[in-house]
Image (tube, helix red, strand yellow):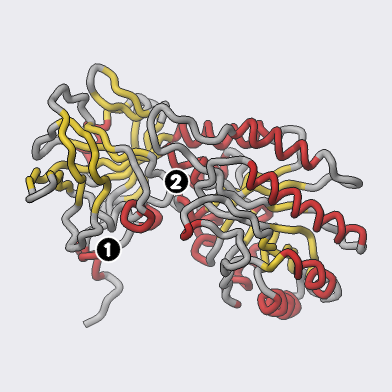
């Protein structure tokens, strides 16, 4: 959050006061710092300097075309999980030769589009998917570069909904069964078996689960090479978390790189090319959600601050019970009160924060919800027929709208009476 700072009592994103953005664009609104996003991407790139690698930004974290375009300009690859994300990555200028296609339920149409585009790697998650991919590759007359996403049975300690690396989860292929499936797939004429992949979860704050997963991937890859398979890529997925509390630091990307490289250096023969799929750790801290106070209200046992942003704009607190810091856009010197920050939606689960100590705010004043650059706008919806908010990118002392606020006409444009 280093580019979101108070100056003379006003909250700034880089060189722009957020009150200026709210006055110009309205609220609610997502505000992103280009500087934070670029700095985080470069930290990853530096951490693996000297090691063959591609940083494939996870599009699901935030799929805004403008943000994807900035990352493509820095040399990022992309991790996609749908045909729509493929379309977005290409529309933003992404290099198809740096795209990896993950996901447990790829359709034939999505695979065909990715084959036409010439992507780097399909991360297949079942034997059925491999069979379909081989048939589609034969039809297209081109080999499909493929890896198996293996499930390494590593506990990441994250929320159950975003933990994906245990045997009971729907993702990947049990690592104990992977070797036999690899040897079978290697006999398919239209598959080019090129890598081993995994993804153990999201918002992981410890490095040890990644180290354990990489050691298991490397062990499998070494066995496959001894069988004569040309395994080039090790895809460790993403999942590195961020801190949601001021004054606390998330995992150190540099240390993450050093410890992973130490494991890779133990490999024999030709060096592996490491693929990483960070999302949250690139864009999470780069975004805030601005909301205007509508009313304050005292219930029988609680105080409520009712704002114009809601769970359709930021679902994570309701879905995961996630914590996001909330602060006034003006550094108010008023008495502190304990309150829930809630939205207008007709659900008791519509809250952005609960039981928070905040300065006593008044209707019309502005609040900022921090660390919402990832899985904020991307999880947005039109629930209660609410309009999705605009998105703004700050670049130094200027800002520009990168997604317009929806209109009521947009809300019903695709519907028919």
User: Residue 288, located in which quarter of the rendered image?
Assistant: top left
Name the one closer to the observer, 316 or 43. Answer: 316
Q: Earlier in the sequence, mark 1 or mark 2?
A: 2
Taking the image as shown, residue 162 lies to the left or right of residue 253, namely: left
Up-down: is 82 above or below 89? below
Residue shown at 29% from the left, 22% from the top: 6
Up-down: is 3 above or below 83? above
Name the one closer to the observer, 15 or 344. Answer: 344
Q: Secondary structure at mark 2?
A: helix
Residue shown at 79% from the left, 42% from the top: 264
Query: Does the image show residue 208?
Result: yes
Residue ID for mark 2: 66
Dot 1, crowdedness within 10 Å: few (<14), some or many (≥20)?
A: few
Residue shown at 7% from the left, 46% from the top: 298
Name the one closer to the observer, 398 or 230. Answer: 230
Residue ID for mark 1: 382
> Looking at the image, how many numbered discs can be counted on the residues?
2
Q: Position of residue 316 (x, y in %)?
A: 36, 53
Tell whether label 2 touches label 1 (CB within 8 Å).
Answer: no
């Amino acid at each position: 959050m280093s580019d979101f700072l108070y100056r003379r009592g006003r909250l700034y994103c880089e060189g722009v006061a957020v009150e200026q953005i709210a006055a110009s664009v309205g609220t609610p609104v997502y505000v992103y710092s280009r500087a934070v996003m670029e700095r985080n991407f470069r930290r990853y790139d530096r951490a693996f300097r000297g090691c063959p690698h591609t940083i494939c930004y996870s599009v699901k974290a935030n799929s805004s075309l403008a943000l994807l375009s900035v990352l493509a300009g820095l040399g990022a690859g992309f991790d996609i999980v749908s045909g729509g994300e493929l379309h977005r990555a290409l529309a933003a200028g992404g290099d198809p030769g740096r795209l990896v296609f993950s996901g447990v339920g790829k359709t034939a149409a999505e695979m065909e589009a990715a084959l036409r585009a010439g992507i780097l790697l399909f991360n297949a998650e079942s034997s059925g998917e491999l069979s379909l991919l081989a048939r589609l590759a034969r039809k297209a007359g081109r080999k499909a570069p493929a890896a198996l996403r293996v499930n390494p049975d590593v506990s990441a300690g994250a929320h159950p909904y975003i933990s994906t690396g245990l045997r009971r989860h729907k993702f990947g292929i049990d690592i104990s069964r992977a070797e036999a499936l690899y040897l079978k797939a290697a006999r398919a004429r239209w598959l080019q078996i090129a890598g081993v992949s995994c993804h153990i979860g999201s918002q992981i704050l410890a490095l040890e689960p990644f180290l354990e997963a990489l050691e298991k991937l490397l062990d499998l890859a070494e066995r496959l090479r001894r069988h004569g398979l040309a395994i080039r890529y090790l895809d460790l997925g993403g999942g590195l978390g961020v801190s949601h509390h001021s004054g606390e630091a998330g995992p150190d990307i540099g240390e993450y790189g050093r410890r992973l490289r130490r494991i890779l250096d133990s490999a024999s023969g030709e060096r592996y090319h490491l693929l990483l799929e960070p999302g949250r750790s690139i864009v999470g801290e780069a975004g805030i959600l601005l909301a205007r106070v509508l009313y304050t209200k005292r219930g029988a046992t609680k105080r409520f601050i009712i704002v114009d942003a809601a769970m359709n704009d930021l679902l994570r607190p309701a879905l995961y019970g996630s914590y996001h810091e909330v602060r006034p856009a003006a550094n108010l010197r008023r008495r502190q009160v304990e309150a829930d920050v809630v939205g207008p939606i007709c659900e008791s689960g519509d809250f952005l924060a609960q039981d928070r100590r905040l300065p006593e705010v008044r209707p019309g004043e502005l609040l900022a919800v921090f660390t919402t650059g990832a899985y904020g706008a991307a999880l947005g919806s039109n629930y209660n027929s609410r309009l999705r908010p605009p998105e703004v990118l700050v670049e130094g002392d200027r800002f520009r709208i990168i997604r317009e606020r929806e209109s009521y006409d947009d809300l019903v444009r695709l519907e028919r009476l």
